[in-house]
Amino acid sequence: MSRLKTLEFDAPAIALPQRVLDLLNDADERIDAFQHARRDEPIAAFVPSDFVAVYQALTAIEIQRLAPGRRFLEWGCGVGVATCLAAELGFDAVGIEIEDELVDVSRELAADHQVAAQFVAGSFVPPEQEDLFDMLGDFNWVRTDGCDAYDELDLDPDDFDVVYCYPWPGEEALSEELFAQCGATGALLLSFHGREGMRLRRLV
């Protein structure tokens, strides 16, 4: 029996504040510049999600008071946009990313927009959970060869109240099982699934 309970929630189609629009426009430019600079050696797993949908989903979580607390974690944060959006909404926001170059872009983006978000280079999969790869099959894009990000944070996965991720097709089971194994009871898993949109689950 799954420990993840799907929550029905309505993400309001709200007008984004100008500060958020400025952040998203700048992020788009930085993403384009990064991808152009790496056109000969692209980071294959780097595909940005729908950041407007992320902001609206996090706003719905706030309005409906669904989160048990204020700590937000993004697994595989890319250039850190979702983490910055969470921080803008008042979360104590952290992003974990295994690609050092993307972490650098994330930190610059947050600093330039005066966003109080933290970014750590490393794997979002705790070392004690790496056996999930053997249990659940082969995964193309999730890497565990980086340092233990939680050790640098001096936090554990179950210290966070909302976890956000954008799993690749076929890798949803890994993110779900990882959250079920190491998340906190009552915490939320918010995930983006392309055309299928956002899913919100609670660990029970």
Image (spheres, rainbow, N blue to C red):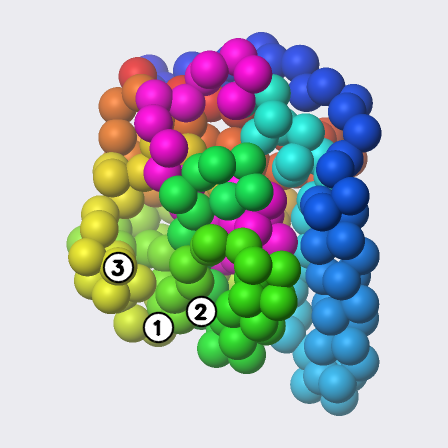
Q: Quick check: is 31 in the magenta stretch?
A: no
Residue 7 in sight here: yes
Mark 1 residue crowding within 10 angstroms, few (<14) / some (14–19) / many (20+): some
Write the start and end of the magenta stretch as one range: 62-86
Q: Earlier in the sequence, mark 1 or mark 3?
A: 1
Q: Name the one closer to the observer, 121 or 4.
A: 121
The CA span between labels 1 and 2 is 6 Å
Q: Is residue 192 above or below residue 31?
A: above
Q: Quadrant of the C terminus?
A: top left
**Callout 1 secondary element:** loop
Look at 54% across and 55% down and name the residue there. Answer: 115
Classify residue 164 as left or right of residue 180: right
Q: Position of residue 113 (x, y in %)?
A: 62, 60
Q: Amino acid at mark 1?
A: Gly
Look at 50% across and 44% down and name the residue there. Answer: 87
Classify residue 88 as left or right of residue 136: right
**Callout 2 secondary element:** loop
Q: Amino acid at mark 3?
A: Leu
Kindly identify which residue carries mark 3. Answer: 153
Kindly identify which residue carries mark 2. Answer: 98
Mark 2 residue crowding within 10 angstroms, few (<14) / some (14–19) / many (20+): many
